[in-house]
Image: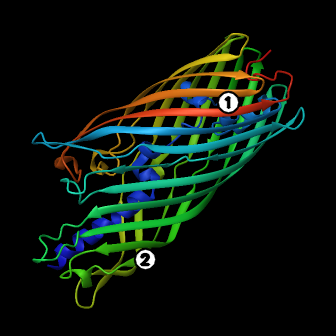
Amino acid sequence: MKTRILHPVAAAALVAILFAAPGARANGFFIQEMSAAGLGQAMALVAEGGRPTSQYQNVANLSFMEGLWLEASATTYFFDGGFRNPQGQYTASTTPAQVVPSFFASYRVNDWLAVGLAEFTAFGLSMEWPENWEGRHLAIRSGLQTFTINPNISIGPFKGFAVGVGFNAMYGSFSIKRALTLGANPLGDAAPNTVELAASAWGFGGNVGLMYQPADWVRIGLAYRSGIKIAAKNGKMDYDVNQVFASRFPDQNFKASISLPHVVMGGVRFWPRKDLSLEVDVQWVQWSSYDELRFDLSKGLELGPTARQMSLIEKKDYHDAIQLRIGMEYKFFRDMLALRLGFLWDQNPVPDKSVDPMLPDTERLMPCISFGGIWKGIYLDVGYMPVFGLKRKVTLEDGAPMAGTYTSVTHDLTLTLGYHWGGPKKQQAAAPQ
């Protein structure tokens, strides 16, 4: 009986850690859709230098923008996906639409100094399943939110070179609800037998970027964003179980920490003509930094009359992943209107043994489009990107906790409103003269 009781408690604790770490759920929680103009170019912005949002991809972009730029964006995510078990029964996810806002500002102080401020969500979103579905012991509801404040500064360009640095303060919170496999309740006991977990913490990191423009028609960028350690010290683990098991499932606190991955980005932007720019970017996301989970409990898990387990440790085998991004921007009607197209390939970093309903990760393909215009310094852009997740089939022999096939399509819609003032080219400062 002790073994049966320990199993759901340990599993619940481990799921809490998995969700507390965005890296554990990998690319599915990695958000870079921070503006409509960027979305339309598949966020291939490492060498763009045209809008303030590009300071996320490379802080040195600030040195290639004139005047003052302010822009606010909101991306809405519409989910469509589900799970099919080996018997052919299909369960659709009940995940609602979600909105993620962002804000970016930049100002060129003089010929050699530019500053910027960014507020964004780099890791987030949630996923929901029906209350009584077959995988409820793995996940009913899971949600992650992060909020990053990122002041930046860039110096240059000097003979085509520019360099920038920034500081990141990230606040992260998570919540999860799942069912416990305790068997049937005693007659008259309607307890749902669930556990809910929640925690939040601050983490800090930095970013640096380089840019070199050897000629008017080409610009080369390289950037790095450090991993951020999120350490939760007062997480809450709350049980709602029937009276038979209540004494063995005490509400308690937990401590856990995880290091989010480092990200290295490189890109080249070409201007074959003044009104047309093309960019190719590569991102290296170091998910391999996620190799172990450790979860410290305040009350522990009962192993026997006098023995308790006070921590849970689980090894993982994640690998680094590559993202390839291709973007294009075409300006017309006196540079007042712009059409943008892009494509993104996202490599899957999660092995089969770690795939579960929390967020079943897979290789993803993303075509992108956006359209916008600017008039008297005010600009409006709208962008759309469907995220096609390739079917992910896992088996118990793979080590997965649940055998079956996951499918997913997410529709991302971004709206951006901004204002540009000052500089020698008020309506658009991205393209070289």
| Residue where numbered disc 1 is placed | 221
Dot 2 crowding, Cα within 10 Å, few <14, some 14–19, many 20+: some
Question: Could you say whether the residue bearing mark 2 is in a helix, strand or loop?
Answer: strand
| Residue where numbered disc 2 is placed | 253
CA gap, disc 2 and disc 1 = 45 Å
Q: Residue 187, image x and y in percent?
A: 9, 77
Q: Residue 389, image x and y in percent?
A: 35, 33
- Work out whether 126 lies above or below 234: above
Which residue shows up at 25% across the image and 81% down it?
A: 246
Going by the image, does 394 lie left or right of 68? Answer: left
Going by the image, does 188 lie left or right of 236? Answer: left
- The residue nearer to you, when weighing 319 against 259, is 259
Which amino acid is tagged 2?
Asn
Quadrant for residue 237, please give it.
bottom left
State the quadrant of the N terminus: bottom left
Residue furthest bottom as drawn:
306
- The residue nearer to you, when weighing 224 against 382, is 382
Which residue shows up at 29% across the image and 56% down it?
A: 139
Question: Could you say whether the residue bearing mark 1 is in a helix, strand or loop?
Answer: strand
Between disc 2 and disc 1, the foreground one is: 2
User: Can residue 339 be seen in the rendering of this structure?
Assistant: yes
User: Can residue 50 be seen in the rendering of this structure?
Assistant: no
State the quadrant of the C terminus: top right
Going by the image, does 73 lie left or right of 216? Answer: left
Quadrant for residue 312, please give it.
bottom left
Which residue shows up at 33% across the image and 62% down it?
A: 177
- Work out whether 44 lies above or below 300: above
Q: Residue 20, image x and y in percent?
A: 44, 60
